[in-house]
Image: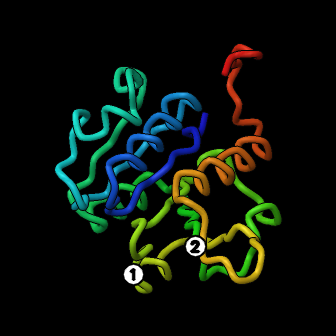
């Protein structure tokens, strides 16, 4: 049985967004990979407000660098899908696979071009002209939801809970 979908946070800048994305991972039962260095001291305490009491429910993998993460990913045979405002393929037109890793960049700078080019696919969220981007946690939530819908990745969750 292939591994489930994962999310990856490339050198996150803001503890509030990181906590929100870790909470997303906990609620959707996906592993979250944090690729360091972070722009803040990484700790549950730093993310307490947004992570709330979900720290015991999140499957978390920390990688000391992108190179360490990429070596793990390639060794596991996993496809990397980058969310990027520079991409040309709308996420809802992309065919996700159940073991994809969805990666978001830093809130301030995204990912460097050389890392973006290493992704197996790059997708974007179509938006109204004249606006720059959505919050990274909102973007990841949208794309993860579509990816899980496409792949049947919603586990037997209890319906009606929010």
Q: Nearer the viewer, residue 102 or 56?
A: 56
- Please report the residue visible at 42 percent of the width from the left and 22 percent of the height from the top: 57
Q: Position of residue 24 (x, y in %)?
A: 53, 37
Residue at the location (55% across, 67% down)? Answer: 82
Residue picked out by circle 1? 112
Tell me the quarter of the picture where residue 69 sits: bottom left
- Which residue position is annotated with label 2? 84
Is 148 above or below relative to 133? Answer: above
The color scheme shown is rainbow
- Name the one closer to the observer, 118 or 38: 38
Give the answer, above or below, for where 76 lies relative to 148: below
Q: Quadrant of the C terminus?
A: top right
Q: Could you say where residue 127 lies in the image, as x and y percent from the top left?
A: 75, 71
> Quick one: label 1, few (<14), some, or many (20+) residues within 10 Å?
few
The alpha-carbon separation of the residues under discs 1 and 2 comes to 11 Å
Q: Quadrant of residue 107?
A: bottom left
Tell me if 129 is positioned left or right of 80 in this view: right
Q: Residue at x 28, y 47 (%)?
A: 62
Is residue 122 rendered to the left or right of residue 50? right
Q: Secondary structure at mark 2?
A: loop
């Amino acid at each position: 049985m292939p591994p489930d979908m994962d999310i990856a946070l490339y050198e996150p800048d803001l503890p509030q967004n990181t906590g929100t994305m870790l909470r997303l991972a906990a609620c959707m039962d996906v592993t979250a990979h944090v690729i360091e260095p972070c722009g803040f001291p990484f700790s549950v305490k730093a993310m307490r407000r947004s992570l709330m009491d979900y720290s015991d429910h999140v499957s978390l993998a920390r990688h000391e660098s992108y190179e360490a993460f990429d070596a793990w990913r390639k060794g596991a045979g996993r496809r990397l899908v980058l969310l990027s405002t520079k991409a040309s393929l709308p996420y809802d037109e992309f065919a996700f696979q159940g073991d994809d890793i969805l990666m978001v960049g830093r809130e301030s700078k995204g990912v460097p071009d050389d890392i973006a080019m290493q992704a197996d696919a790059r997708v974007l969220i179509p938006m109204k002209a004249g606006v720059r981007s959505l919050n990274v946690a909102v973007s990841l939530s949208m794309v993860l939801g579509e990816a899980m819908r496409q792949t049947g990745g919603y586990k037997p969750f209890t319906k009606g809970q929010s």
